[in-house]
Every structure is written in structure tokens, then in C-alpha cells.
Amino acid sequence: MNAGRGGAGRSRGFSLLEMLLVMVLIAATGVLAAGVVGGGFARMELRSHVRDIATQLRFTRARALATGMPQTFSIDPAAHVWQGAEGRSGEVPESLGIRFVGAREVQPAEGVGAIVFFGDGASTGGRVRISRGEAAFDIDVAWLTGGVSVHRAEPLR
């Protein structure tokens, strides 16, 4: 019997609500800690957009290989927008800087950069630099193979 506990039949332990509250607090603390350790939320945003653009460049190359037809990835640094294969498009926040270096012959308009991927995997090549303050990443596209690589950019001098 439960005469010594003061309650009739109530078992000790934590309720589901209490457990969920503790899990939410732990998750929130983890996200904040990751932001501080990883260089802050600004750097996380930078890396996220770099990965997104690199992924879209790789997708555009894959579509060129799959269809055997040239596919174009274009980026407008002034408008902070990009467009890839199959009508995919996106925006880059104004808080991030964008620079493009590539073949002038395939530019769709003044100030707009483009990389054309051919059916054999080759490309016109180019570089997209995404930056925020002193932190910057280069997304390089090799002209011979069309391979896309990402690396931390050297500081401008």
C-alpha cells in the first residue's frame, strides 16, 4: 500500500511534458554553443550559401552530362541572384559579398557571370567568391573537367 506517501496510487518520476522541456533546453543550448564555437551565425550563413551555390553548380554539370546538351549557371553579383539548370534559381543575402571571375564570351549580360557546362563534362570554368567581412570562400570550376571545388579564400591584398 501507499499509505506512507500521502497519495493514493501516484508513482514517482517525470512527466512527458517535463522530459520534452528538458530536451528542448538541451537542443537550444547545443545550437547556441555550435554558433559560438563555429564562428557565429554569420559564418554559418556564409557556409550555407557557399554549399548551396556549389551544389547548384554540380547539379548543372550533372544535367549537362545527363542530357549531352550545354547547361548554364549564371550569377548576378549586383542583384545577388543566381540561376542554374532546369530553371533552378536562388538569392544570396545582401549581407554577403559576391565576386565572379570567368569567361567574358559567355556572359549573358554586362556584370552577370556565367559558367557553361558541356555534354562531355568540360566547362568554360570560373570562380565565385562569397564573402562576409574577412571570411571568404572560393568556389572554383575547372574548365577541363568541370569539377567544382570549394576552399577558404586567401585574404585580398
Image: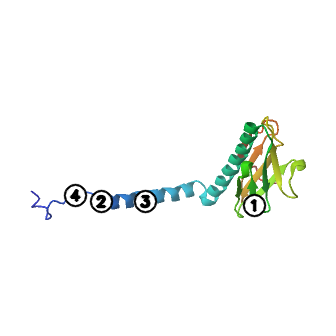
Q: Position of residue 79 (x, y in %)?
A: 78, 62
Name the secondary structure under disc 3: helix
Q: Amino acid at mark 4?
A: Arg
Q: CA distance from mark 4 to mark 2?
A: 9 Å
Q: Position of residue 99 (x, y in %)?
A: 79, 55
Task: Tell which circle, 1 or 3, labels the residue nearer the N-terminal end.
Answer: 3
Q: Quadrant of the C terminus?
A: bottom right
Q: Quadrant of the N terminus?
A: bottom left
Task: Tell which circle, 1 or 4, labels the residue nearer the N-terminal end.
Answer: 4
Image depth: mark 1 or mark 3 in front: 1
Q: How is the image coloured?
A: rainbow
Q: Amino acid at mark 1?
A: His
Q: Residue at x 80, y 37 (%)?
A: 122
> Within 10 angstroms of label 3, few (less than 14), some, or many (20 or more) residues?
few
Q: Residue at x 74, y 50 (%)?
A: 84
Q: Which residue is mark 1?
A: 80
**Between 144 and 97, the one nearer to me in the picture:** 144
Do callouts 2 and 3 mark residues in contact (Cβ within 8 Å)?
A: no
Q: Which residue is mark 2?
A: 15
Q: In the rendered view, does 23 fall on the left or right side of 113? A: left
Q: Position of residue 100 (x, y in %)?
A: 81, 53
Name the secondary structure under disc 4: loop
Q: Which mark is residue 24?
A: 3
Q: CA distance from mark 1 to mark 3?
A: 35 Å
Q: Which mark is residue 11?
A: none
Q: Which residue is mark 4?
A: 12
State the count of labels: 4
Q: Position of residue 39 (x, y in %)?
A: 61, 56
Name the secondary structure under disc 1: loop
Name the secondary structure under disc 2: loop
Q: Amino acid at mark 3?
A: Val
